Amino acid sequence: MAILKIARMGHPVLLARAAEVEDVRAAEGRRLLADMVATLKDAGGVGLAAPQVFASVRLFIFYVPESRAGSGGALPLTAVFNPVVTPLDEEMELGWEGCLSIPGLRAAVPRYKKVRLSGLGIEGEALNMVLEGFAARVVQHEADHLDGMMYPMRMRDFRYFGFNEEMDRNPVPLPGEVL
Ligand code: NI
């Protein structure tokens, strides 16, 4: 296992459409997956997409820690090859997001509240999950990376974009939120 370098916004690998994974069980994919798990643990995020470690293939990993579980519940670390994220209703909500490829910053980004995540698991088995709230947000963010999308491209109001250090000192309420 190796801890990989994480591409930062501005590198073209983050703007490309990643390729489908042909054989989920190939040694190459397994090595990449193990390295992504080690890299995510080291970096301390909740999700990582393969293009963020310079591998332009359709694979991401994510989890939902207890501290972020909310009403949707916690989820263990899950790997998804060739993921497809489909909104299950039209309702969207604003929530804070960061990205390991945009270190030190966060922003309020609109995302669908409820989605279906399908794709293939590490043994090539079909995955099919209905996710809400934070989990839905995370998989929409990670799936975007496979299509060359980064969260600033989804933003509607740049007043809700800033450095973590500043925003921790001066918390900004989201519309309708009371701090
Ligand atoms: Ni990201």
Image (cartoon, rainbow, N blue to C red):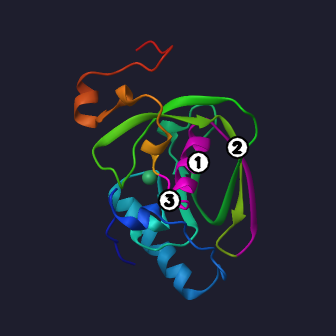
Tag 2: amino acid: Val
From the top left corner, tell me how far across and down residue 30 is, in percent.
54, 80
Residue behind mark 1 = 140
Q: Say which of 104 and 45 sits in front.
A: 104
First of labels 3, 1 by sequence position: 1
Disc 1 is placed on an element classified as: helix
Q: At x 53% / y 49%, what residue is drawn?
A: 141
Q: At x 50% / y 59%, what residue is drawn?
A: 148
Tag 1: amino acid: Gln
Taking the magenta stretch, the answer to whether it contains residue 140 is yes
Q: Say which of 120 and 142 sits in front.
A: 142
Magenta-highlighted residues: 124-149
- Picture disc at residue 148: 3
C-alpha separation, residue under disc 2 versus residue under disc 1: 8 Å
Does 95 sit left or right of 170 as displayed? right
Q: Are marks 2 and 1 in contact (CB under 8 Å)?
A: yes
Taking the magenta stretch, the answer to whether it contains residue 118 is no
From the top left corner, tell me how far across and down residue 57 is, in percent.
54, 72
From the top left corner, tell me how far across and down residue 166 is, in percent.
23, 30
Q: Is mark 3 within 8 Å of ligand 1?
A: no
First of labels 2, 3 by sequence position: 2
Q: Does 33 sit above or below residue 111?
A: below
Q: At x 39% / y 43%, what residue is drawn?
A: 98
Residue behind mark 2 = 115
